[in-house]
Amino acid sequence: MDRLHALSLFAAVAEAESFAGGARAMGVSAPTATRAVHALETALGTALLTRTTRRVRLTETGRVYLEQVRDVLAQLQAADDQAAGTAQRPVGQLRITCPQEFGRIYVAPLLTEFLDRFPAVSADVLMVDRVVNLVEEGFDLAVRIGPLPSSGLVAVRVGEVRRIVCGAPAYFRQHGRPASPAELSRHRLVSIGTGGPAREWRFGSGPAVAIRPQLNVSSIAAAIEIARQGWGLSRVLSYQVGPDLESGALETVLDAEAPEALPIHLVRADGRGSAAKVRAFMAFAAERLRQNSALRRARA
C-alpha cells in the first residue's frame, strides 16, 4: 500500500476513533485499515494510536502527527484541484462546526440551499456548544458567537445577538412584567444548564443578579418551549427565539438592562481559504445571515 493512502487511512481512523469507522469512510475493509496504520507505526518506530476493545485514541505523538498529516493531505488536494481545473469550482466535502441551536435554526436551511446549488459538494456539520479547534479537528469553517480571541483565523462578521429575558404574553397577563432585575425574584424562572439551583444573570455593566429558578433544564429548546407555553420566564440568546419574537409568541423584558451585544462571525483557518467550496459557502452564508433581521439588530 502506498504511503499516501496509508496516511489517509490513519487520518480517517483517528477522526472516527475506530478502525471500522475509518475503513467505512475510506471504502476499504477494517483489516486493511488496521494493516495500514500498523505499517505506518512500524515505519515511524512509534505508536500513533492506543487501542481498546471499544475505540482507538491518539497518542500525544499521534495527535501532533495527525495535524501535520491533515496539512499534507489538504495541500495535496489543493494541488490536485488546481491541476484538474477545479480550484474555482466548489467540489468535495465541507466540514462545518457551529453552536447546536444556531445550526438547527440557521445553518441547516442555508446548507440545503447551498448543496442544491452546488451538487458536487457534500457537507458534514458538527453542532456542538463548545469551541472546536478547526485545525486540530479538521474543520473548514465555524460559527463563533462572542468576542474572538487573537488567533490565526480569518473572520467575517455576519451579525450580532444579545442575551434576553423572555416570556409568553399569557404569562405577562397573569403575573405582570418585571420592571428591574431585582423583581425577577417574584417570578417563575426557568434556567438552563447543569449543577445546583443557584444561578446568576448579569445585566448591563452592573453586578450579577443572583436568581433561584423554580425549574432548571439542560436543554435550550426545552426552556424555550416552557416559556412559550406561558409557565415562566427564561434567559436565552436572541437568535434562539428570533421567529418567536417576530410572531409575538414570546416577548422580551428588561431590554434596557441587557448586556452588550455579542458578535457572530464565520471563521476559517488561514490556510483553508483557497478551496472553492470554502470561499463559496462563506460568501453565500454571510450574505444570507446578514439579511436575517433576527441577527441584524441587537436590541428590540
Image (cartoon, rainbow, N blue to C red):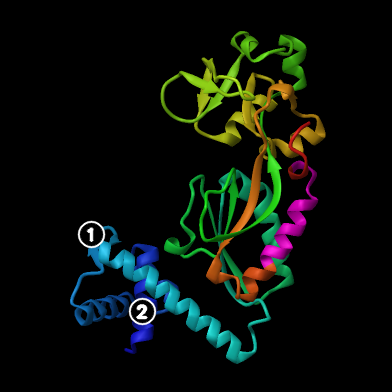
Q: Is residue 228 magenta?
A: no
Question: Foreground: 110 or 155?
Answer: 155
Mark 2: secondary structure: helix
Mark 1: secondary structure: loop
N-terminal-most mark, 1 or 2: 2
Q: Residue at x 78, y 48 (%)?
A: 292
| Residue 22 horizontal/vertical position (percent) | 38, 70
Q: Is residue 283 magenta?
A: yes
**Please, what is the three-letter code of the amino acid marked with disc 2?**
Leu
> What's the magenta region?
281-294
Locate residue 231: give its quadrant.
Answer: top right
Q: Which mark is residue 7?
A: 2
**Please, what is the three-letter code of the amino acid marked with disc 1?**
Thr
| Residue 103 horizontal/vertical position (percent) | 62, 50
Question: Foreground: 270 or 56?
Answer: 270
Classify residue 101 as left or right of residue 172.
left
Can residue 96 be spotted in the picture?
yes
Q: Residue at x 43, y 72 (%)?
A: 70
| Residue 254 horizontal/vertical position (percent) | 71, 20
| Residue 120 horizontal/vertical position (percent) | 65, 77
Can residue 23 be spotted in the picture?
no
Question: Foreground: 231 or 292?
Answer: 292
Q: CA distance from mark 1 to mark 2?
A: 23 Å
Vertical position of residue 282 compared to residue 28: above or below: above
Q: Which residue is mark 1?
A: 53
- Mark nearest the camera among 1 and 2 is 2
* Badge 2 density bin: few <14, some 14–19, many ≥20, Cα 10 Å: many
Classify residue 275 as left or right of residue 169.
left
